[in-house]
Image (cartoon, helix red, strand yellow):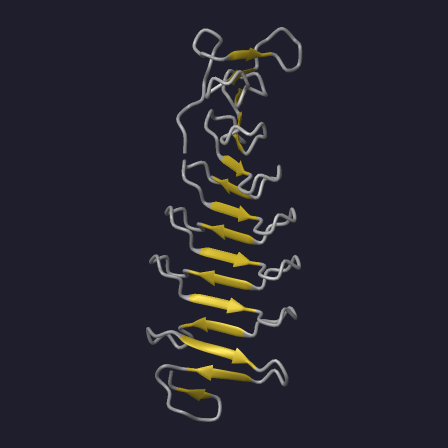
Amino acid sequence: MTDDLDFHADDVDGIPLDVNDDGVIDGFGFDTNHDGLIDAVVMDTDGDGLADFAAVDSDFDGNIDTVGYDTNSDGRLDVFGSDTDGDGIIDVVAADTDYDSRVDAVVIDTNADGRADVFAADTNSDGVIDVAVSDTNHDGVFDHAIADTNHDGVFDVAVADIDHDGVVDVAVADFNNDGRIDAVAVNTTDRRPSVFDSDVGPDTDAFRV
């Protein structure tokens, strides 16, 4: 993620900041593009000598678009937020929840309504995302999900609520453990399931795909 963020007044080439007027420097501002405006700030909010907050105006438009937080006071930023569309609202958040210096959770607001539409996580801390859910119609309810259940780097389970009624309509996985992906689809009218099994010939509810 990042190296230790320890700083002292004599070690940092920036503008000292005392945001609470207590006479103690608790942050520094930086003008990285030399236009006379501060576009990056690093703060020590708890007074332990380690930076635990950073904010950056990466496109120099006068608005902060990237922030970082050190939530466990170890001197390393472990939560990052970004305003990717320039509307002043953070729409992507990435976090290192187990403090191993690797991002294992990501939240995205795809339509700038202030609500998360996509959530992805690395559940076994191997550095690879293995679960993701999404709210495709932005009603506040997740309706699609995929997962890599055996952590081999390939998503092997997927479910979807196609008609957004709160009930899964399609599920894809290797249901019979034969090494081949199968699928189940539910008729939205009579709720009758149809099974698509790669090893089964045509019959009432199953046929080869």
Between 117 and 37, the residue placed more toward the observer is: 37
**Quarter of the rendering occupied by the C terminus:** bottom left
In the image: residue 60, left or right of residue 203? right
Instruction: Using the image, determine if residue 191 lies above or below residue 177.
Output: below
**Quarter of the rendering occupied by the N terminus:** top left
Occupied quadrant, residue 92: top right
Instruction: Using the image, determine if residue 129 lies above or below residue 86.
Output: below
Q: Position of residue 107 (x, y in %)?
A: 54, 47
In the image: residue 156, left or right of residue 57? left
Q: Residue at x 51, y 68 (%)?
A: 159
Q: Position of residue 54 (x, y in %)?
A: 52, 26
Q: Position of residue 15 (x, y in %)?
A: 53, 12
Occupied quadrant, residue 102: top left
| Residue most extreme to the bottom | 203
Occupied quadrant, residue 76: top left
Instruction: Using the image, determine if residue 81 lies above or below residue 6.
Output: below
Q: Residue at x 49, y 19 (%)?
A: 50
Q: Residue at x 53, y 41 (%)?
A: 84
Q: Residue at x 41, y 60 (%)?
A: 148
Instruction: Using the image, determine if residue 202 lies above or below residue 90.
Output: below
Q: How many marks?
A: 0
Q: Position of residue 198 (x, y in %)?
A: 36, 81
Between 26 and 199, the residue placed more toward the observer is: 26
